[in-house]
Structures are given as C-alpha cells and as structure tokens.
Image (spheres, rainbow, N blue to C red):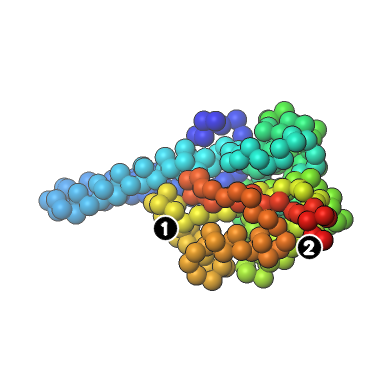
C-alpha cells in the first residue's frame, strides 16, 4: 500500500510523520546563510543534513509505512484464517486493520488505554473509522483496558497481535503483559509480537528510537531477550524475523498434551 497518500488516518502527529521535512527546511535555510557568508564547508555539511532529512522522511513513509496499516510479516499467523483475535495496545488501528484485511473471516477485539499522546484524536472512534475505511467495522469490538491486566477469561482468543505497544512498558510491565497474553490465548493459538528494532533503518531515521526497547530489556541482544521473554511466558517461538525498523516474533501457546 502507498504509505504517503493513504485513505487511512492513524493520527500520528506531525513530528512523527513530517518532522524530517521541517528539519530539511532548517538545514536548507542555514546552508543558504552559510553560503552567502562564504562559509563553504559549513554549507556543504548542512547540505548533507538536507539529504539525510529527506531520505529519513522517505524511510518513515515507505520503509516504516507510518501512514499505512502494518504489513503482516508471516503467513503462519492464524493460519486457519478465522477466529477471535486480540490486538493488545491497538492505538489507532494499524494492526487491527492488518488482521481484518489479511484474515477476512476473523474478528478483532481492539484493546487500548488510549493514552498515547503522539496519536491525535486517539480514541475508539478513530480506530473504528479506520476499520470502516477497510470495510470491516462490523468485525471489530473495541475495549478500554490495560494489557498488563487483561479483562478477559482464560483461553478467550484464537490469536493475539501486539505491534509497537508492549515495548513501551518497563521490564516488569513486559513480563505481566506477556503472561496475560499467554493466559487469554487458547492452546495452539498464535501470538504475533512486533517491536521497534534498533537496526540501520531505525538508527538512520531516528537514533533515539534506535535505542527503544533496549532500555527495558537491560542491555544488548534485544532480539534474543524478547525471544527469551516469550519463552518464559510459556510460549514456543516458532518464527522470528525483521522488517525495516521492526523485529517480529511468532509464538505458539503449547497444547494441553504438550504440557504433560
């Protein structure tokens, strides 16, 4: 899907979507002044800043796809194609729309506390509007809650997704959220966890975001640490991979016979 021109409105505020264009304008103005006052080397350095800002803007739009639904990274999630799916930390609905469109026979329960201040108009209404754009608002139920204490019974869901949400929690919160995901997932159900990955794409786009997640996982080897956290929560990690700025983990909750 074309990321810049999108029928969806996921509400990300301008510093996240167009902030690099403002930086390019600042660099351009400073470069023009430097050139005028014959500071040629400074002007060239600032010109490199313009190139970086414009390139980073393209990474945000077409690599990270901030204005588009999340791309499903693996066909093995909810392979049966139907069932009840929980979106933990759904925000404005990028992952909810992903499930609705990629698994058109599934239903989604979107849970969030709607506290993210980087999403303008962050609310159930915004998420439902995006589900309506996808033509699937009738397959969504919206719930307000905390992913660390999910308001659902054990084994309520056939699948769970969580994208760029659990990694906002501190270490204790991550442990609680993963334990809750294991509790409410049915045996043999799949859990798709996507987190920000400090890869070259992310470090190029935003060096500060490149450190996201490492803070709460106590040091380097963040991807192995996420896999270990999932294992500790009772999951079997059956697939892991990467996309620009993203690490994903597909985990399965063992069935009853496997636990004996």
| Label at residue 180 | none
Under circle 1, the secondary element is: loop
Q: Please identify the residue farthest to the top as the structure is shown.
A: 135
Based on the displayed image, in which of its 4 quarters is residue 73 positioned? top right
Identity of the residue drawn at 80% across and 53% down: 255
Find the distance from the CA under tag 1 to the CA under tag 2: 32 Å
What SS does tag 2 mark? loop
* Residue 98 relative to residue 223: left or right: right
Q: What numbered label is drawn on residue 149?
A: 2
Front residue of this view, candidates 166 and 60: 166
Quadrant (top left, top right, bottom left, bottom right) of the C terminus: bottom right
- Observer able to see residue 177: no
* Residue at image point 64% right, 64% down: 229
Q: Quadrant of the N terminus?
A: top right
The answer to whether residue 83 is visible is yes
Image location of residue 178, percent across then percent down = 70, 61
Q: Which residue is mark 1?
A: 207
**Rendered location of residue 117, percent (x, y):** 61, 55
Say which of 28 and 242 sits in front. 242
Residue 252 in the image, given as x and y percentages of width and height = 71, 51
Pointer 1 local density, CA inside 10 Å: few below 14, some 14–19, many at least 20:
some
Count of labels in the image = 2
């Amino acid at each position: 899907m074309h990321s810049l021109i999108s029928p969806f409105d996921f509400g990300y505020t301008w510093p996240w979507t167009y902030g690099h264009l403002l930086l390019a304008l600042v660099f351009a103005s400073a470069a023009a002044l430097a050139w005028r006052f014959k500071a040629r080397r400074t002007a060239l350095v600032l010109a490199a800043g313009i190139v970086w800002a414009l390139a980073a803007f393209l990474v945000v739009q077409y690599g990270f796809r901030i204005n588009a639904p999340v791309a499903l990274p693996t066909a093995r999630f909810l392979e049966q194609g139907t069932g009840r799916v929980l979106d933990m930390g759904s925000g404005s609905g990028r992952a909810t729309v992903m499930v609705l469109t990629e698994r058109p026979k599934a239903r989604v329960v979107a849970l969030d506390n709607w506290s993210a201040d980087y999403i303008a108009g962050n609310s159930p209404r915004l998420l439902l509007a995006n589900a309506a754009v996808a033509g699937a608002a009738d397959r969504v139920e919206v719930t307000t809650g905390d992913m660390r204490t999910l308001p659902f019974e054990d084994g309520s869901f056939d699948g769970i997704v969580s994208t760029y949400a659990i990694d906002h929690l501190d270490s204790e919160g991550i442990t609680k959220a993963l334990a809750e995901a294991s509790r409410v997932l049915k045996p043999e159900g799949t859990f798709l966890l996507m987190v920000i990955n400090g890869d070259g794409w992310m470090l190029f786009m935003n060096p500060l975001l490149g450190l996201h997640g490492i803070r709460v996982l106590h040091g380097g080897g963040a991807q192995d640490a996420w896999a270990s956290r999932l294992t500790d929560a009772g999951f079997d990690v059956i697939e892991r991979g990467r996309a620009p700025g993203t690490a994903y983990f597909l985990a399965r909750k063992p069935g009853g016979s496997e636990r004996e």
